[in-house]
Amino acid sequence: MNGDPGGQPLVPVLAIVGTGLIGGSFAAALRRVGQAGRVLGVGRNPASLQRARSLGLIDDVASLAQAAAEADLIFLATPVGAMAPILRDLASLLRPDTLVTDAGSTKADVARLAQEILGERHAQFIPGHPIAGSEMAGPEAADPMLYHGRKVVLTPFDDTPGVLQHRLIRVWEACGARVSLMTPEAHDRALAAVSHVPHFLAAAYMTQVIRADDADTRLNLAGTGFRDFTRIAAGSAEVWRDIFLSNRAAVLRELDDFDQALQLLRAALEGDTDPAALETLLEQAALARRFWGGRSQMP
Amino acid sequence: MNGDPGGQPLVPVLAIVGTGLIGGSFAAALRRVGQAGRVLGVGRNPASLQRARSLGLIDDVASLAQAAAEADLIFLATPVGAMAPILRDLASLLRPDTLVTDAGSTKADVARLAQEILGERHAQFIPGHPIAGSEMAGPEAADPMLYHGRKVVLTPFDDTPGVLQHRLIRVWEACGARVSLMTPEAHDRALAAVSHVPHFLAAAYMTQVIRADDADTRLNLAGTGFRDFTRIAAGSAEVWRDIFLSNRAAVLRELDDFDQALQLLRAALEGDTDPAALETLLEQAALARRFWGGRSQMP
């Protein structure tokens, strides 16, 4: 993929706020295809910034003010909870032609923050969510291929200029990602369903297992089904607490829907047991999962 | 590992009833360590039996009567639902020194069947459950290492002679498995918790996802968390229907307990949200899962 006709990279100066797995991988992905010129790293942890520089993820450590003055694209790769003070600083520093985006797991709250804090500059901010990650963290875990073949959701405002949207889409495509545009609310609802609720259920399930009298026997007999079903429950409690709280309404709504589906299967198992109805429900679930595995090439 | 002092293998003549993944892997595992002499294959599907012979899993195809006349150990690797007629035939054929075992996923029902059908010969039957498997099926999927490092639960009757128990333990240990002895009820309760309930929840969750108006958007944004959480839901609807029905009481009890744990997490998220309580619950679940991963070396 080529940048501008003059041989300019897509992002002449890139600023990464938060140089861990997500930010570091974004810089590495753009560097790999020659689409990032100079990369500035902004962050609160000097040791982490130095490691990012030693690893070649960033060229220089910078303040937010320096980044705002020089960068063409500012990529916020911090937890959603840390975004408000950064946006507050950026509000007075942002040049009119700078594009800002983020990588937070929820989008309605980020969009609201950007509108409230950036005021009329909010249209320069395009909330985003690359659906990729890893159990690992820190700049050492950065991987230029992390976003390759993965979905990235962007939730531009109604008044975001098309030219800015196209620039950001090209940048993500240069990282190998496939971009979808949707509203922040549709994103949060879909992510509540396919990411947040599974995590909530896996955590509730682990809670049940460890509270049982025979917890040790149980854990001792657990096999590969248990392993895969509960893997997500091992994630950072702090990160997931923030995700659940920031997407609370959608998560609770999805949990209600899950409860209905659970009662449906349960009704086929208890009382006047209906083996055919139970098998039909299991078969529909199995076919949907196999179809998804085939389509996504993620068995 | 050595067999009898005279150089005899642990199982001079082994009969496998059902020569698919489970039965074929058992024969292959014992052959690998030289602990099976002659292997007879019994089954209803001639093509499958011939494939098992071509693959070297069995030496000869045999009838159940031949197997009962010649085998030192009869391994029933059929679905639990197919076991009653086999036991009925064996009841009149079984020699007093032949050991019989099975590999079914539930044990109280199998133990009950054996007592009802085999009468005073029931003590020769030791119900068993190797906690190992694979999405694959058929003799081609047989793997001599399938049981290596895996748990096998045996649920001998109170009047099963110790010498028979020890023989079967040595046989499974020769396959590389680690044997636990427990009552059929304790097995079924623990398996309901760590295997059947996760499957039931994963199926209910898939049911919810596919019934949503925006099911396609959801499946389109699903990532690796979704992939692992739902993998078990792709399993055979027929097999899992039988497992749920045969272990119904324990599964329903565990689903009640799961619901309590879910309400506990939910209460921390809704109403007067308590971020600290939510984080504590998530942290306990995460620590338990990480501890299990470390202990079982199954991250």
Image (cartoon, coloured by chain):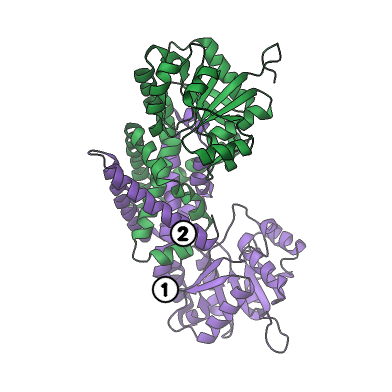
Chain colours: A purple, B green
At x 43% / y 21%, what residue is drawn?
B90
Separation of marks 2 and 1 at Cα, in angstroms = 27 Å
Front disc: 2 or 1: 2
At x 51% / y 59%, what residue is drawn?
A294
Residue sitting farthest toward the right: A54
Task: Say few, some or many: other residues with alpha carbon within 10 Å of mark 1 (under 14 / 14 to 19 / 20 or more).
Answer: some
Q: Chain of mark 2?
A: A
Q: Position of residue A220 (x, y in %)?
A: 52, 30
Task: Say few, some or many: other residues with alpha carbon within 10 Å of mark 2 (under 14 / 14 to 19 / 20 or more).
Answer: some
Q: Name the residue carrying label 1.
A: A183
Specify which label sits upstream in the sequence, 2 or 1: 1
Number of disc labels: 2
Q: Is residue A156 above or below residue B195?
A: below
Specify the label residue A235 is tagged with.
none
Q: Name the kind of residue labelled 1 in the image.
A: Thr
Q: Chain of mark 1?
A: A
Is B176 displayed left or right of B200 in the figure? right
Q: Name the residue carrying label 2.
A: A291
Asked whether B177 or B190 is in front, the reply is: B177
Asked whether B83 or B52 is in front, the reply is: B52
Q: Name the kind of residue labelled 2 in the image.
A: Phe
Q: Quadrant of residue A252?
A: bottom left
Q: Position of residue A287 (x, y in %)?
A: 42, 55
Q: Is residue B260 above or below residue A238?
A: above
Q: Position of residue A174 (x, y in %)?
A: 64, 75
Q: Position of residue B126 (x, y in %)?
A: 47, 20
* Quadrant in which the N terminus of chain A appears: bottom right
